[in-house]
Image (cartoon, grey):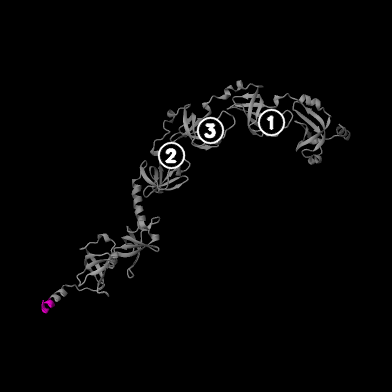
Amino acid sequence: MSAEKQSIMAELYENTLREINEGEIVKGEIVGITEKDVIVDIGFKSEGFIPLGEFRDIEELKEGNQVDVLIESTEDDAGRLILSYSKAQKLKGWQKIVDEVDEGSSVEGRVVKPVNGGYIVDMQGADAFLPRSLSAFKGVAPKDIIGNKYKFVVTKMNKQRRNIILSRREVVQKERDEIRAKLWDKIEKGQKRVGSVKGITDFGAFIDLGGIDGLLHITDMSWSRINHPSELVAVGDEIEVLILDFDKENSKVSLGLKQITANPWEGIENKYPVASKIQGKVVNLMPYGVFVEIDKGIEGLLHSSEISWQKKMVNPQEMFAIGDMIEVQIINIDRDTKRISLSLKQLEKNPWLEAEEKFPIDSKVEGKIRGFTDYGAFVELDGSIEGMIHVSDMSWTRKVNHPQEIFKKGQSVEIVVLAVDPDQRKITLGYKQLKDNPWSEIAEQYPVGKVLEAEVVMNSEFGVFVKLEEELEGLIYASEIDKTASDALKAGDKIQVKVIKVDVDQMKIGLSSKVSDDQAREVEQE
């Protein structure tokens, strides 16, 4: 080719090239993609290179695509054309923002990355800052936020510095208000809705119905007895509830869970007639009785007085355990108050109907000491009947202060039946009656005027009790002993006493400490 022709071709080539300026945004065509760069032809004498990392949607890049790029340099040190895709997007986005957006405007953006104090949001190619306090992302992990698009409000904007601060809180609140308003228009009494358990308290659970919180009270959770809402629901559970009532002005909604199922108390009298026997499970133990579940949602009370025919009240917590299966009898049903009374003892024949025949008065019987009170000892006569020995019927001659001075728990004893009252379920027993009354002989042995030495047992406000012999005590009247002398006495001391009264009917011996010296010497000589 001649030199003239080469000159003409060069001139034609130069004329086809665009005139470009650094800082200008131009359109280009992707002509190649490498591992590091995207190669773009903008009609210049050389192709430009853009780092691959400037493109967010790399998978969508294809040769032939048209892209807007910023000319950063027409020729770098290596003689290459340097272009920027990201800067072109930011500049275009900012120019658009300047024209269309002001403080208070609603905008859309994609959360790009977390930074100190908040997040960077891509807004039409321009970066904006979203403070964490205004993000409404509380409790949400960053990995679930990055890359997602959201709506925001521009709270602050400096166009000269290209500085934008966003808020999502107002948008979220507005959306919630709109959802809540729509939900209030749709809510009706008797309506079933699915909600999420938001929180649990001792008195119930709060359910999020999708913008409105409702209260599911513990009494509306189950037809059965429950001690705490956590027995049925947990935070995060999705459950179906019934709208029982609502107050739009005060934003209150009452919910029911048990009302979704049929009321098991309907027709209860026909299903469980009085006097019928039924198996049930012990679900709760109280000092006064046992709660027994006889059907799903149906519980009855086995009162402690209906456990045994014994007059003495039993402790249910010592006899049963939660989960025990027991047979009981229905003795009363009150559907209005949802109460069922149960009995265990009614399953057995009433032993008190035969008590008078089985334990005739003055008969001697065997029994076992089962317990004590300050005034007596309880004796088990058979598996279901107890009698009591009063302290006054334990000894003919001894003043018994407590029955444990005479008996031990579990001790087998022979006693005499003194009285039987089937209506009151009471049998009076005697222990001293096994022996003859010795007081006629005692009166002869301790005539009035007799002086003897006795052992102090205890002081009292009305006198000093002394032991005259084993199992026989007398009382020195307070008026028959000097108070100073009385106060000085202690148990075990010896003292000279004189018999001044013997009451056979009351089984008492009255004494005096006023003994003459001659009488005292006579006792010492004896």
Question: Where, quadrant-wise, is the C terminus in this rendering?
Answer: top right
Q: Is residue 175 above or below residue 300?
A: below
Q: Camera-side residue: 80 or 347?
A: 80
Mark identifier at residue 303: 3
Q: Main secondary structure of the magenta part?
A: helix
Q: Residues within 10 Å of mark 1 (few under 14, many from 20)?
A: many
Indicate the amino acid at tag 3: His
Dot placed on the residue nearer the N-terminal end, 3 or 2: 2
Residue type for callout 1: Val
Looking at the rendered structure, the secondary structure element under dot 2 is loop
In the rendered structure, the answer to whether residue 184 lies left or right of residue 387 reads: left
Q: Secondary structure at mark 3?
A: strand
Disc 3 from disc 2: Cα separation: 23 Å
- Of 489 and 204, nearer the camera is 489
- Provide residue 67's location: percent of width, then percent of height: 23, 65
Q: Is residue 331 visible?
A: no
Quadrant of the frame with the N terminus: bottom left
In this figure, which residue is indicated by the disc labeled 2?
222
